[in-house]
Image (cartoon, rainbow, N blue to C red):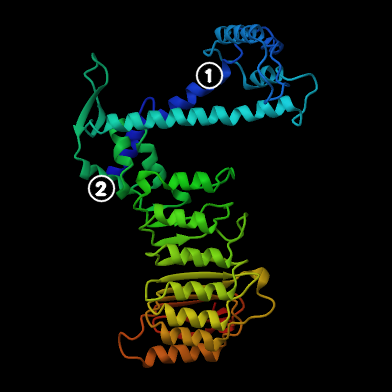
Amino acid sequence: RIPDLVRQHCNMSKQPAKRSAKRKAIDAIAGACAGMDAPGALLPSIDLSSKAGAKKKAAGTIADASNERNALIASLDLSSNMPPRNIADALLSLLPQGATRQHPSSKKLVKAFPLVIAALENRSNLLSRKSETQGQHSQLAFRFPTKGDGKQGEQFTTIQCPEDTFVNILKYLQGREIVSTSLVCKSWLVTSRLPGLWGKLDDACGLTNKSRKLNVTTFLKLLARPQFSCLKHIKMPLHSFQLSKTSISKMSKLLPHLETLEMPEIWSTGPKMKDEHIVAIAENFMNLKSIRNIEMWSISNIGIANMAQILGGGKLLDLRIYGSINHLADSGLSAIANSCQNLKHFAYKILWRYHIGRDDLSGGGIVDLFRKCRRLEIVELKDARRLTKEHCEEILTMVEEGEEGDFALRRINLEGGYPFIIKEHPFRIVDKDTLYQHF
C-alpha cells in the first residue's frame, strides 16, 4: 500500500508547482487588459507595420514611444479575471484595420508569442534548478493528517524517510506518477530525478507527440536531462520526426546504456526510416539488444541484412519487423540467422494492405532460422504465405529430436491466412477447420 500512500500524498499538496504556475499564468493573461474601457484603447499609437531593419528614429520619437509603453505597463492590472476572448480582441486592436495573418504587422505579433513562451520556460528552468538545489539540503518526509481533539482542528504527523527507502517506493510507480511526486516538495523533486528511477521512457511516461510540436532539437534536449543518463528502454513518440545520421550519433552519446529501441507504432504519421538510418543505429548504439517495430516502408532487405551483420556477435536478442512496401527476403533472414544466433524473440508480420503480391521469404529460409538460432523462445509470423504445413512439421520434428537443452522454443504464433495453428505443451499442428468444428 505504500505506493498508494505516495499517490495520496501527491493529492494532499495544497499548491503544487505546476498547478500554481498554471493558475498564475491564467491570472496574468486574464488581467492583461484590465482598466481599459474597450479593446481599442490598448496602445492605439504603436505602429507594428514598420520594417524590422529600419534605422532608429529621432531621440524625441523614441522617448515618446517609451513614455507611452511605460504608461501602458503602469495601467495593467494582472489580478483581474478578463475572459480570453477580450484579451484576444485587445491584441488584435494593435493591428491595422482589416489586417490578416499575411500582413507584416500580424506576422510580427505572431512571432512575439514564441519569444514569450521561451522566456517563461527559461524562468521555469531557473526556478527548477533553484528548487532542486534547495531540496538537496532538505530531508525526505511524509506528512499525514491525524484527527484533532475538536479544539485545535486537524493536526498532521510528519515521518522522516531514508532516501534509499523512498527510492524503492518510487520504483513501483509509473513515469507520470513519478512526475506528480516531484510537485509535492523540493526534496521529493530531487529524489524523483534520480537516474535509477528512469530506466524506461515511453508514452506511459509522458513521451508523446500528440501536438506534433516535438522536433529533433527539443527531443535531444529532453534526453540530455540528467535523470535520463541511465536510460535502457526508449519508445519513439507518435507522429515522429526524421532522425538523421548526425542526430542518431548525438542520441547515442546521450544514451550510452540503451538496450531497447522501440520505433513508433505502425501507421503513425511522419517520415519513415531508411537503410542508412537503421545502419547508423546499429553502428552507434553498442549495447543494443532489442529493436522493435521496424517498418519496411523505406527500409529494404539489404538494410536489414547490413544491420544484422553489424549487430552480430550474439548481442541482439529481440528483433521485430513489419513488412509493408518492402518485404524481408531469404538473404536478409539468412544474415539474421548467421549473425544473431542468440536471438530469443523474432517477429515478422506483413501488414494487411501489403500481403498481396510478391513474397520473397520462403519456408526453407524460416526453417534455417530455427536450425541456426536455437535459443529462440518466441517466433511470431503473419502472412508469410510460403511457409507451409510441411515446413512447420519439419521445424517441430527438429525440436523434438534435439537433445534436451538444444532448443529453447516455447511458442510459435501464426497469424493471418494460415489454414492451421501451432499449439504447445506438447507442440502440435491443428487445422483451423477442425478447431472450429470442435467449438
Q: Does residue 132 appear left or right of residue 264 in this picture?
A: left
* 97 lies left or right of 220: right
> Pointer 1: what residue?
28
Q: Amino acid at mark 1?
A: Ala
Residue 201 rendering spot, x and y as whole percentages:
42, 51
**Within the image, what quadrant is residue 76 found in?**
top right
Image-based side of 224 in relation to 243, left or right: left
> Up-down: is 82 above or below 208?
above
Label 2 and label 1: CA atoms lie apart by: 40 Å
> Residue at point 44% right, 88% down?
396
Label 1 element class: helix
Q: Earlier in the sequence, mark 2 or mark 1?
A: 1
| Residue 49 horizontal side relative to residue 310, left or right | right
- Identify the disc placed on residue 168: 2
Q: Quadrant of residue 65 in the image?
A: top right
Where is residue 298? Give x, y as percent: 62, 66
Instruction: Give the percent coordinates (x, y) of residue 262.
Output: 48, 60
Identified by mark 2, the residue type is: Asn
Residue situated in front as seen by the camera: 376 or 317: 317
The residue lying at 60 percent from left, 60 percent from top is 272
Between 65 and 322, the one nearer to me in the picture: 65
- Location of the C terminus by quadrant is bottom right
The answer to whether any part of residue 25 appears in the image is yes
For residue 290, above or below residue 151: below
**Quadrant showing the N terminus:** top left
Residue 52's tag is none
Residue at image location 51% in from the left, 44% down from the top: 218
